[in-house]
Image (cartoon, rainbow, N blue to C red):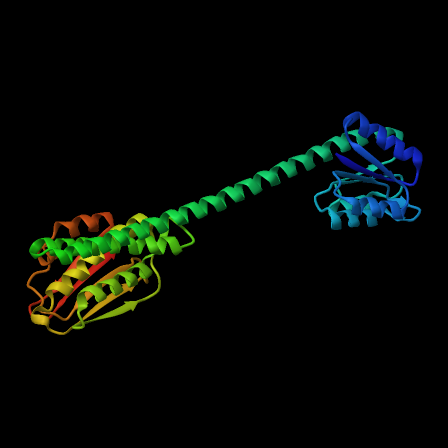
Amino acid sequence: MRVLVIDDTPDDRQLVRHELESLFPDADIIELAGRAETEAALAAGPADLVVTDLSLRWGSGREVFERVKELMPACPVIMFTGSGDEMTAVDLLKAGLDDYVVKSPRQLSRLRASLRVVVDASRSRTALSKRELQLTQALAHKDIVVRELHHRVKNNLQSMASLLKLRAKRSGGALATHLEELSGQMRALAAVQLRTYKSEQFDRVDFAAVLDDLMESLSANYANGQVTLVRDFEGTLDLESDRATSLSLLCYEIILNALKHAWPDRRKGRLVVALWTQGKRAGISVSDDGVGFEGTDVVKGLGTRLIRALAREAQAEIVTVSRLGEGCTVTLHLV
């Protein structure tokens, strides 16, 4: 512990030294009387405490206090003085002085208490700062680990999707179709992981970006140049990652179903995917200008139990409107 005692009165310096030695026997106490030696001691390295008089023959304790805070902002400073008044004390305390003790026999106990309290408070602040630094470093490390985990999961999903697609090409019939669809589902999951990895919050994701990635992937694999995919997004859609995963798979199934069945015989068509967040509830719609079908039951129209289960997980209500020859619109109302 390094302590600087700045006073041009030897007896007062000895008084402060006596109190310091009784409280902190191992302290390195440096007595300073002049400007040059004070400046040299301040520049020599950090101090753990500075005790200074207010009125010095070569300057003022206020100058010393300001210089200490300039060089060592965390170092506590006590003003031990026989000059000054209450207004001066208040002014200095407002400026950041740790304590102001008047030189008098009745204030000696006050000086001892001040030394103890100020040093203990400084040590507590230092310990807290170190702990905050450790927590900050731990959080930064955790952030790196979590990002790397999301990145690896995304890469693994994409690798699995590519392997399934390759196996589908080597297979035939219904097996090839199932493998191809499974590959697409893997890519839908990877789209959520990719956007989660790029997000500042690992538990939430912008689903508009996920849906955009999903449309691009489906267009490349299933549109075959005959279907034009149109994006009609109004703003972003912030969702929990788990919900976004279910919704991504749900949208994948709906868009894929349209691409596979809305335009038979390689007809040309237009598929519009809309997303909005205005009003009380957000929503997504998938509209095609294909052959359509009779009825309004989405399960009958899409013919899959998976959609019903994914809709429950994604907390989405499905409404389907379709007529023969007039296309189909599937709307997801997020609840």
Q: How many numbered circles does the render carry?
A: 0
Q: Is residue 258 left or right of residue 162?
A: left
List x then y, in percent, for residue 66: 78, 50
Nearer to me, 251 or 326: 251
Q: In this view, does 207 lie to the left or right of 15?
A: left
Nearer to me, 189 or 64: 189
> Who's the residue at 25% across and 62% down the image?
217
Q: Return the residue found at the far bottom.
A: 268
Note whether residue 181 is visible.
no
Q: Return the residue found at the far front.
A: 170
Q: In this view, does 283 lie to the left or right of 67?
A: left
Residue 190 sits in which quadrant? bottom left
| Residue 123, above or below 97 | above
> Who's the residue at 79% across and 29% down the image?
112
> Who's the residue at 45% across and 47% down the image?
143
> Who's the residue at 67% across and 35% down the image?
123
| Residue 227, above or below 150 | below
Note whether residue 127 is visible.
yes
List x then y, in percent, for residue 203: 37, 48
| Residue 118, above or below 294 | above
Residue 77 sits in which quadrant? top right
List x then y, in percent, for residue 333: 24, 57
| Residue 254, above or below 142 | below
Image quarter of the N terminus: top right
List x then y, in percent, for residue 44: 79, 45
